[in-house]
Image (cartoon, grey):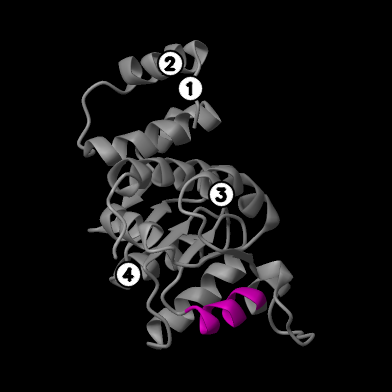
Amino acid sequence: MEWHISDAQSLRVIDRQIGDHLFTPSEYELVRRVIYATADFEFASLVHFSEHALTSGAAALAARTTIIVDVPMVQVGIAPPIQKTFANPVYCSMDALTRPQKDKSQTAWGIETLAQRYPEGIFIVGESQTALEALIDLIEAGQIRPALVVATPAGFLDIDVLKHRLQDSMIPNIRIEGQKGNPVLAVSIMNGLIDLAWQAYGNAPKAM
């Protein structure tokens, strides 16, 4: 991301208002990007990181691991930084070819289809609660083992249960706790992670 002086001034406001915190420097970089994108300081207490989430995600990006997203808004939002850096393939669940089904949404069937093709991929679920549930079902069944799951969907029905299941899965994840959420959060988190990973791996010597 290219920062301008107004961005830097806004980030200083965020830093002053947040004050002391328990995030690592890398975690805090993602948290303040979420706050910058939403102007909502409550997210300082809602963004949660599992153990090794950032290191696993950064390494997967550097390895050009396939990225699976639930909705086009996330795909479009992360495309520019991905194309300028690691150039990972990015697939959207809504573009996956599936047979018409009645018991699951299109995004849920799409993400399930893509998960079975790319069981160790990076998964970003920004909007669809049903897609997140399908993904967690596959994780709990031992059928897939993602390198990272970013989960930011809003919801009123059992969304906390789903996010706790993700937390308990031992899969590296970054999630928004509670009912709040939207794809903008997923894009902010992922673009911040891409920047951090590029700083760590972008200038590394290429393997022979």
Residue type pointed to by label 1: Trp
| Rendering coords of residue 61 (x, y %) | 40, 58
In this picture, is 65 found above or below 5? below
What residue is pinned by disc 3? 83
Label 3 residue SS: helix
Whether tag 3 and tag 4 are in contact, CB under 8 A, the answer is: no
Compute the Cα span from label 1 to label 3: 18 Å
Single out the mark in the foreground, 1 or 2: 1
Q: Nearer the viewer, residue 178 or 68?
A: 68
Question: Considering the image in quadrants, where does the C terminus appear?
Answer: bottom left
Residue type pointed to by label 2: Ala
What residue is pinned by disc 4? 171
For residue 52, say whether it is visible: yes
Residue type pointed to by label 4: Ile
Label 2 residue SS: helix
Compute the Cα span from label 1 to label 2: 7 Å
Start-end of magenta stretch = 110-118
Mark toward the start of the polypeptide (4 vs 2)? 2
Mark toward the start of the polypeptide (3 vs 2)? 2
Single out the mark in the foreground, 1 or 3: 3
- Total marks placed: 4
In this picture, is 143 found above or below 130? below
Residue under the point 34% across and 34% down = 29
Whether tag 1 and tag 2 are in contact, CB under 8 A, the answer is: yes
Mark toward the start of the polypeptide (1 vs 3)? 1
Compute the Cα span from label 3 to label 4: 26 Å
Label 4 residue SS: loop
Residue type pointed to by label 3: Gln
What residue is pinned by disc 1? 3
